Image (cartoon, grey):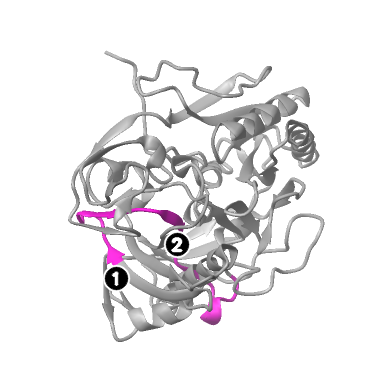
Amino acid sequence: MLIRSIHTVRGVGTGGATEWRDGTLTVSAEEAQALVAAPSLAGVKVSWASPGDAVRIVKVLDVVEPRSKGPGGGGVFPGWLGPSGPRSGRLGGPAVEGPTHVLRGAAVVVAGYLPRAQEAVIDMSGPAAELSPFGSTHNLVIEFTPAPDADWADVDDALRRGSLALAARLAEAALDAPPDEEETVPDPGPVEGLPRIGAVTNLQTQGVFKDVFVRGESFNGQAPALIDPAEIDDGAVVSGQFGHPSLRNPTWVHQNHPIAGALRARHGKDLAFAGVVLSPEPVSASEKARISAAAAQLCAEAGFEAVIVTKEGGGNADADVALKMDALEDLGIAAVGLFAEMAGPDGTGPPIVVAPEKATAMVSTGNYDTRLDLPEMERSLGGEELALLGVPATSAMQLPTAVILASLGCLGGGRLTCAQEA
C-alpha cells in the first residue's frame, strides 16, 4: 500500500541553500544548475514562476512533480536515478517501500527549443492559466543553451536526467519535516460483489522527441503490460513526448494519474480498482490492431470487467483508443474512451479522426481548435518569441487550446466542463 506524505508548497524563493521551512521551498540556483549541468549543455538557468504572475512560459518540454522516498533519489524515477528493478511476470517489480514525499503545488518545468517539439504554452495568469494544471503550481523553470555541435538527442537526455534529479532533490528538502497530510492509497484488487474496473493508458511512441519511457527504457516496440500503479506514482513513467501540447501527458500528469486516482477513490465503495495496463501507440495500422488485441486480452486475463481507455497525441492516437475499445467489447469487456475533439474553431467539424465501430461509450475532453484570447504578459520564460505566430512571447495573442499544455486532459483530470445550452 502506497503512502504519500504531502508537503503543501505555499511560497517559493531562491537562496544560498535548498531547504524547506514552514511551507516555503527555497532553492539554491547554484545547486539546481549543477544538478542539470551536462557536457551537451553550454548553460542552464532556473527561475520561479508562480500562480498569478504575469508570466508566459513557452516552448515547454516536460513538467515533473518533486517527489522522493529518501536521500539521493532512491526509490523514485527508476532507470534514471536508480536501478530499474527486477523484471517479473508483469512490468517492473514492486514499488519501493516507505512513504513517498510529495511537494504538492510545486513543479520543475523544462522549457526551450528542441527539434520536433511543438510549441507548448503555460500562462501563470489569465484564461489559459485556468485550463492547464500548471497555471496553479509554483514552477521552477529550467532554461538551457545547448553546447556547440551537441547532438540534440544528448541535449534531450541531459535535460530529462537533470530535471528528474532536481525534482527529487527539492522533495528531499522536506524529508525530515512533518507532512501537512498523509494519503493512504489502496492497492488494486478484487472486492467481493463489486465490478473490477481498470485502465488502459496509451503512451505516445513515435521515436525520438515523441516517446515515453518506462523504468528508464523507451516503450516504443514494447508489448502492453500490467504495472503496479504505485510505481507510476513513484515516477516509473517519464515523458519524452513533445508533440500536441494540449494532448500531451507530461511526467507530472503520469505521477498524478487522474484515472487511477479516481478509481482508487471509489475502490471498495462502488467498484474494485483492477489495475493499469500500459500500451504503446505504434504508427502502422497493422501494429495498432495487433497491440490493441494484445491489450484487450491482457485485460481479460487480469479479470477486468470494464476499462477506461485514454490516449496521448493527435488524430493518429484516436485509432489506438478506438481499436482497443472494439477489441475489449469483442471480449465482453465494457469500454469507455476519452477523446479530445478536433472539430474546428466553431466545433461543427467531425470531432474524432478514427471512431470505434462497436463500442459507443465516449467522453469528450474538449475541442483542440477552440480559440483563446490571451493577455499581454510582463515577462516570458523558455524563449523570447512564440514561434507558432512569430510574435514576442509576451504579446497579447489568440491561440488555439491545442497549444496550452495538458489542457485537454487526455489522461483525465481536465478542467473543461460542459452543460446543456439554456
**Can the viewer see residue 333?**
no
Choose top left, top right, bottom left or bottom right for residue 354: top right
* Residue 63 part of the magenta-drawn span: yes
Which badge, 2 or 1, is on the more N-terminal residue? 1
Three-letter amino acid code of the residue under disc 2: Glu
- Indicate whether 103 appears above or below 285: below
How many numbered discs, if any?
A: 2
The foreground one among 181 and 33 is 33
- Indicate whether 295 appears above or below 52: above
Apparent side of residue 8 relative to residue 339 in the rendered image (left or right): left
* Image quarter in which the N terminus is found: bottom right
**In x, y percent, where is residue 388?**
37, 43
Q: Residue furthest bottom?
A: 16
Residue shown at the point (34%, 62%) measured from the top left: 139
Q: Nearer the viewer, mark 2 or mark 1?
A: 2
Q: What element carries label 1?
A: loop
**In x, y percent, where is residue 101?**
47, 69
Tell me the tag on residue 150: none
The magenta-colored residue range is: 48-75
User: What residue would you read off at disc 1?
Assistant: 23
Apparent side of residue 242 relative to residue 177 in the rendered image (left or right): right
- Indicate whether 421 appears above or below 332: above
The CA span between labels 2 and 1 is 16 Å
User: What residue would you read off at disc 2?
Assistant: 65
**Can the viewer see residue 266?**
yes
